Amino acid sequence: MGFFSLTQDIAIDLGTANTIITYNDKIVVDEPSVVAIDNKTGDKIAVGERAKQMHEKVNPNIRTIRPLRDGVIADFNACEQMMRGFIEKVNMNSGLFSFSKSLRMVIGVPYGSTEVELRAVRDSAQHANGHDIYLIYEPMASALGIGLDVTAPEGNMVVDIGGGSTEIAVISLGGIVSNGSLRTAGDDFTADIQEYMGRQHNVRISERMAERIKIHVGSALTDLGADAPQDYIVHGPNKITAMPLEVPVCYQEIAHCIDKSIMKIENAIISALEATPPELYADIVHNGIYLAGGGALLRGLDKRLSDKIKIPFHIAENPLYCVAKGTALALKNLQYPFLMR
């Protein structure tokens, strides 16, 4: 692109848990989708990792906000400020010049988004200096990022388990044939763990602690064999006495407590398969089903789903970055028929 080009191209995976921005085929921002706001002035204090470090530790003058819930914008103003903050980081991290007049963006959005939710994404992008804005459904972006030929006359199935939503899609000839968009995903696993610790161990824990438990001992199976992680020690106050507690948590407990949420994802996958034409179904049985998103990293999930549905499940390479890679690839070919303006 020209040195003094008035338009710069960036690809954005605007996720509930993390936002990833790609510029010139390089990931220049990979940070939590959190913004810290000054309550008195309404000004942005921090975004991303710095804001997440403040989360659940703030005083009355500061509030931290996760602007996206269930994969869509829940707080429009906070989202706009967060996007502006991330684009400032793009300027610093990539050498983008501050005098650039406008940005051409490709942004990943959940397949189940309503017109109102899609407009909220477009408006936030426009207020953050976006000029040409293209939207791409996340399961299609995941398929591109995994390396699948989405325009081929062949059925491929992708299950993208993000922070706020699970996107399921059967893709053929550049379109989504059958799908499921489920508002059950990584955040629900975290909430299940938080509720379980209070009910079972009588210990009060934060959302961040529940997330750490999920990362260290999260599992979809109660028997991981030799791959079983060590127990994770949790510190927190007793719900009744407020005295400090130290509780070891094993992966079998977590597998039990998130079982119902995983079952919802299983049922959604089965429903999408039921709506799939027989020829494409045969392709999927042959090719297997691809898992992407942070939820794909849950221990034993691929084996559990394979045993339940009787179709091989493959974890994508770098599942956290599939949507980001896909949006970057779409940015190179804006003629793709599935891009929305």
Image (cartoon, rainbow, N blue to C red):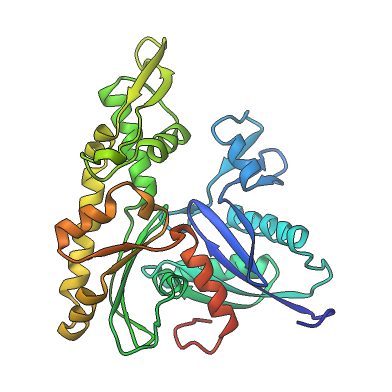
239 over 132 or under it: above or below: above
Q: Is residue 141 visible?
A: yes
Going by the picture, which residue comes out furthest to the front?
226
Depth check, front residue: 156 or 164: 156
Q: Residue at x 63, y 28 (%)?
A: 59
Residue 122: image location, x then y, percent: 56, 71
Q: Is residue 75 visible?
A: no
Residue 8: image location, x then y, percent: 72, 75
Number of on-image labels: 0
123 over 62 or under it: above or below: below
Residue 125 occupies which quadrant of the picture?
bottom right
Residue 14: image location, x then y, percent: 53, 61
Residue 225: image location, x then y, percent: 24, 39
Residue 89 occupies which quadrant of the picture?
bottom right
Q: Is residue 11 left or right of residue 246?
A: right
Q: Is residue 195 left or right of residue 332?
A: left
- Which quadrant of the rendered structure holds the N terminus? bottom right
Q: Residue at x 24, y 34 (%)?
A: 252
Q: Residue at x 34, y 48 (%)?
A: 298
Q: Is residue 179 left or right of residue 84?
A: left
303 over 247 or under it: above or below: below
Depth check, front residue: 188 or 39: 188
